[in-house]
């Protein structure tokens, strides 16, 4: 009886939801079906594309968690955070190592080292 009440309550709430939110739910359900249709002996295996789709759907409609059945909401949030971290790691300049010297200074040092070897020989 409680399941029927939940179903009726969600149907009433869905009447007031935005079109984009409903479309995101539909896409999430279709993507879950695609993952489950793959032959997997133990548990569903998510590819990078699957993770990207779920993370972007969460970005579009955060209420998508109501439609998720095979993925925990915390997992989708973790995938989104990992993708965001990769984006900023890619955009940020490397910080390690020695700073580059100007070309003139490198040429001067090279010339001094070559001149030193000439005197030694």
Image (cartoon, rainbow, N blue to C red):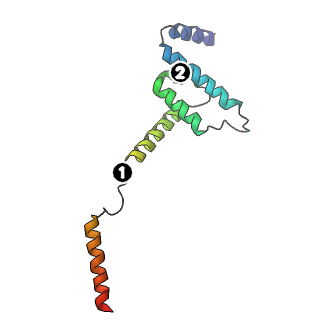
In the rendered structure, find residue 93 and report the number of the disc placed on it.
1
Pinpoint residue 103: horizontal percent, then vertical percent. Answer: 29, 65
Residue picked out by circle 2: 24
Select label 2 or label 1 by which is in front. 1
Pinpoint residue 20: horizontal percent, then vertical percent. Answer: 49, 17
Say which element carries label 1. Answer: loop
Give the crowd class for mark 2: few <14, some 14-19, many >=20 residues within 10 Å.
Answer: many
Residue at position x 63%, y 27% in the image: 32
Q: 88 or 118, which lies in front?
A: 118
Q: 51 or 106, which lies in front?
A: 106
Say which element carries label 2. Answer: helix
Q: 112 or 96, which lies in front?
A: 112
Pinpoint residue 110: horizontal percent, then vertical percent. Answer: 30, 75
Q: In the figure, residue 53 lies in which quadrant?
A: top right
Q: In the figure, residue 7 lies in which quadrant?
A: top right
Give the crowd class for mark 1: few <14, some 14-19, many >=20 residues within 10 Å.
Answer: few
Task: Give the tally of numbered discs.
Answer: 2
Pinpoint residue 62: horizontal percent, then vertical percent. Answer: 47, 24
Q: From mark 2 to mark 1, how far is it between C-alphas? A: 35 Å
Residue at position x 51%, y 27% in the image: 57
Is the residue 99 above or below the residue 112 in the image? above
- 2 or 1: tag closer to the N-terminus: 2
Residue at position x 31%, y 88% in the image: 118
Is the residue 115 above or below the residue 35 in the image? below
Q: Which quadrant, please, contains the C terminus? A: bottom left
> In the drawing, does residue 46 fall left or right of residue 98?
right
Residue at position x 71%, y 39% in the image: 42
Is the residue 99 above or below the residue 21 in the image? below
Is the residue 23 above or below the residue 56 in the image? above
Q: Which quadrant, please, contains the N terminus? A: top right
């Amino acid at each position: 009886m409680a399941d029927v009440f939940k179903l009726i309550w969600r149907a009433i709430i869905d009447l007031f939801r935005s079109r984009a939110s409903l479309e995101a739910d539909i896409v999430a359900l279709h993507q879950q079906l695609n993952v489950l249709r793959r032959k997997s002996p133990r548990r569903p295996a998510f590819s990078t594309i699957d993770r990207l789709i779920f993370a972007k759907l969460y970005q579009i409609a955060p209420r998508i968690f109501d439609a998720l059945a095979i993925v925990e909401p915390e997992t989708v949030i973790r995938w989104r955070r990992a993708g965001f971290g990769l984006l900023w790691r890619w955009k940020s300049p490397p910080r390690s190592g020695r700073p580059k010297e100007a070309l003139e200074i490198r040429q001067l040092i090279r010339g001094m080292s070559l001149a030193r070897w000439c005197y030694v020989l």
